[in-house]
Amino acid sequence: MNLILLGPPGAGKGTQAKILEQGHGLKQLSTGDMLRAAKDAGTEIGLKAKAVMDRGELVSDDIVIGIVSERLDMPDVQKGVIFDGFPRTTAQAAALDKLLASKGQKINAVIEMKVDDEALVKRITGRFTCAKCGTGYHEEFAKPKRLGVCDKCGSTEFTRRPDDNEKTVRDRLQVYNKQTAPLVDYYRGQGNLHVIDGMADIADVTREMEAVLRQLKA
Ligand code: ADP
Ligand code: AMP
């Protein structure tokens, strides 16, 4: 089964993808994480993407489609994928349909997560991540149980993304509304769009997602 979590930056896509991965044998595929790894490793793609990402703009379709295409050939994603942050343009959506069709697969559901802009800014400016295991936290909404210690691996080192500042967030929201929001109609046209209230608590959003998955399996 292949799912797309569609929503603006800070909607909770990564948070929910990591939770859903556990119970359903699916693998999260975050193009943002892949590009950040390329950037940190100093690869050619990473070097090309860095300035674009820091400005909050979109990396070129060719680059992103290329890395997704390679990733989908790997054995660990054959049971199904939760796409997080991809596709972000109609060209990417069309390319994904083609890639999956060539493997005899398709997108089974697209879950659109709706969150108000001011809540998104608050979520993103308070977001931080464990430097060791990558677990995501929020200063107010998802604090570690012990202040300054990662729940999962015990590390005391955390990082913040350079693009998680208020100015860049607002620019990223504009980019989302212009380039990515048209995908809602694209997938509604395919008949597999499900809309959920992303303003709810993390656990309630998970419950809504699980309800969609149950519907798909029924
Ligand atoms: P995305 O992957 O869509 O950019 P994240 O999953 O990283 O968003 O969530 C952004 C921030 O908001 C994180 O710090 C996360 O802990 C927090 N968050 C995620 N979902 C919710 C929610 N439903 N309510 C409050 N905060 C949330
Ligand atoms: P994210 O981690 O999803 O918030 O993405 C962080 C940044 O990576 C974005 O602001 C873009 O610059 C880049 N990026 C991630 N996914 C894509 C994509 N599908 N298409 C283009 N750029 C992307």
Image (cartoon, rainbow, N blue to C red):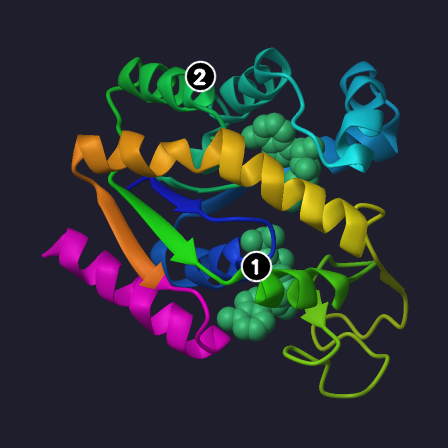
Residue drawn at x 48%, y 37% is 76
Dot 2 alpha-carbon crowd within 10 angstroms: few under 14, some 14 to 19, many 20 or more: few
Mark 1 sits on what residue?
Answer: 117
Q: Residue at x 63, y 79 (%)?
A: 141
User: Does residue 33 appear in the picture of this structure?
Assistant: no
- Can you tell me which quadrant of the image ligand 1 is in? bottom right
Q: Which amino acid, by three-letter code, is at mark 1?
A: Asp
Q: What stretch is highlighted in magenta?
A: 197-218
Q: How far apart are marks 1 and 2 (CA)?
A: 25 Å
Magenta stretch contains residue 201: yes
Whether residue 13 is visible here, answered yes or no, is: yes
Comparing 114 with 72, the one in front is 114
Q: Which amino acid does label 2 sit on?
A: Ala
Residue wearing tag 2: 91
Quadrant location of residue 209? bottom left
- In percent of width and height, residue 31 lies at 60, 34
